[in-house]
Amino acid sequence: MKYMLTYDLMESVRNTNQWLGATARAIGAYPGMAATGNPWVEWIKAWGDVTERTFARMVVKPDWGISAVTGDDGRDHTVRIETLVAKPFGNLIHFRVPGRVPRSRRVLLVAPMSGHYATLLRKTVISLLPDCEVFITDWHNARDIPVSEGRFDVEDYTVYVAEFMRHLGPDLHVMAICQPAPLVLAATALLAEEQPEAQPRSLILVGGPIDPDANATDVTDFGRRITMGQLEQLVIQQVGFKYRGVGRMVYPGLLQLASFMSMNAQTHTQSFVDQIFRSAKGQSSDHDKHNAFYDEYLAVMDMTAEFYLSTVERVFKGREIARNAFEVNGRLVDIGRISTVAVMVVEGEKDDISAPGQCLAALDLLTGLPKAKKAAHLEPGAGHYGIFAGKSWRDNIRPLVLTFMDENGGRTDRRLRPVAVLPTVAAQVD
């Protein structure tokens, strides 16, 4: 699999399907076809519509699509996306709201590097913007990064996050969502050892695999069954000639997407069949529920081979974070050194990616942190996506997270907007 030819072949298959969809849509839209009176004309056009859009979205980075936010004065304020730190494999960006009194809650969202762009957290950003100054890690697509920029693995990721936290200063709350949770925990421990004054006020870990063995899922079972050699031969490919990263070894986004969809193949198949029916009946639109979801879900990015393989080997198989044996540049990072950063764990009861217990394991590793600074919340009935972007996040988890930030912010400020909290939901760890 590790050849440019296989990468280019995969891209050619995607391109061909996009072309077939566009051709079917064009044929179905041709005025002369309507004269036949054949009902299949509309079905051909509908199939083409859905197929072209589906395969076109796979190579497009989605826009943030956040143009404005309502301020305390009732006016809409524009949102400007500014790059604060630009690095080869990812940037630190700020959603600045000109004309609005700066919020005292400063939140860094650490986005996952697991196949999708940081825009997967668009709804999370939108929900936090009215109450917070929001920053986020915007990871780059590996296929667009020249080989001359070097390698990027889990240690480099950890160093990047620590650098971003240093840049933003200690008056900060960090929220790690899914895959980065163990590495953000390590980055905070790295700061605790090297520069304690740069540590954030609080750390919120949302559905991350701190200890993958705490509660097995299909993801962790796959990691146990396959050897590293098999994994490298099966999924690692070399970027082809079409992109700037030509020659770079990657885990292609299209392969990741195939893996994602195979986990719920029947659901996805039915969703696309239903969309073809809606399109044929004239009931679909550019921003309907199906397109709004799949425009983001289908947009995938390549990961560097060394990042993917080191994640599987060190986080899942070796459980280096869970065993507190993770090293950065040959130096052991002791999570027990974290003693001042308040840590909250959020899990979903029905999370089939990072099952309950995997993220909660972080609290046992924090041996130097007082119990009063530890908190955990298990959201009833919530799946993986729901705990950071769905109804559960909006209605229950978000208020709890904001209150946790306020309680551990180190200061009180009149610009903090009060948040309604359900006191029986958040549980402090005994």
Image (cartoon, rainbow, N blue to C red):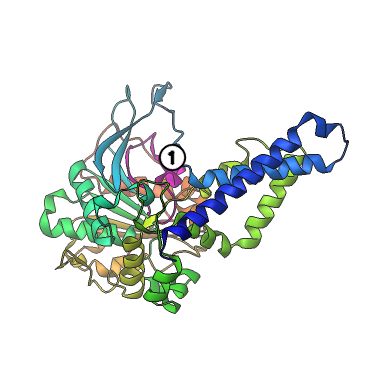
Instruction: Identify the image quadrant of residue 234.
Output: bottom left
Name the residue that disc number 1 marks: 127
Asked if residue 134 lies in the magenta stretch, the reply is yes
Determine the residue located farthest toward the right in the rendered image: 37
Q: Horizontal and vertical percent for residue 107?
A: 30, 43
Asked if residue 222 lies in the magenta stretch, the reply is no
Residue pictured at 41% horizontal, 62% vertical: 3
Q: Horizontal and vertical percent for residue 43?
A: 77, 43
Give the position of the C terminus as an image quadrant: bottom left
Instruction: Identify the image quadrant of residue 25.
Output: top right
Give the position of the N terminus as an image quadrant: bottom left
Q: How many marks?
A: 1
Residue pictured at 40% horizontal, 77% vertical: 227
Within 10 Å of disc 1 (Cα), the crowding (few <14, some 14-19, many 20+) is: some
Q: Horizontal and vertical percent for residue 249?
A: 35, 59
Secondary-structure class at tag 1: helix
Residue 3 in the image: above or below residue 197 = below
Depth order, front residue of 145/50? 145
Q: Which residues are magenta?
A: 112-140
Depth order, front residue of 59/393? 59
Tell whether 254 sits left or right of 160: right
Depth order, front residue of 274/341? 274
Residue pictured at 71% horizontal, 49% vertical: 274
Work out whether residue 106 can be spotted: no
Q: Horizontal and vertical percent for residue 216?
A: 45, 74
Badge 1 amino acid:
Ser
Depth order, front residue of 234/205? 234
Tell whether 263 sits left or right of 176: right
Residue 64 in the image: above or below residue 385 = above
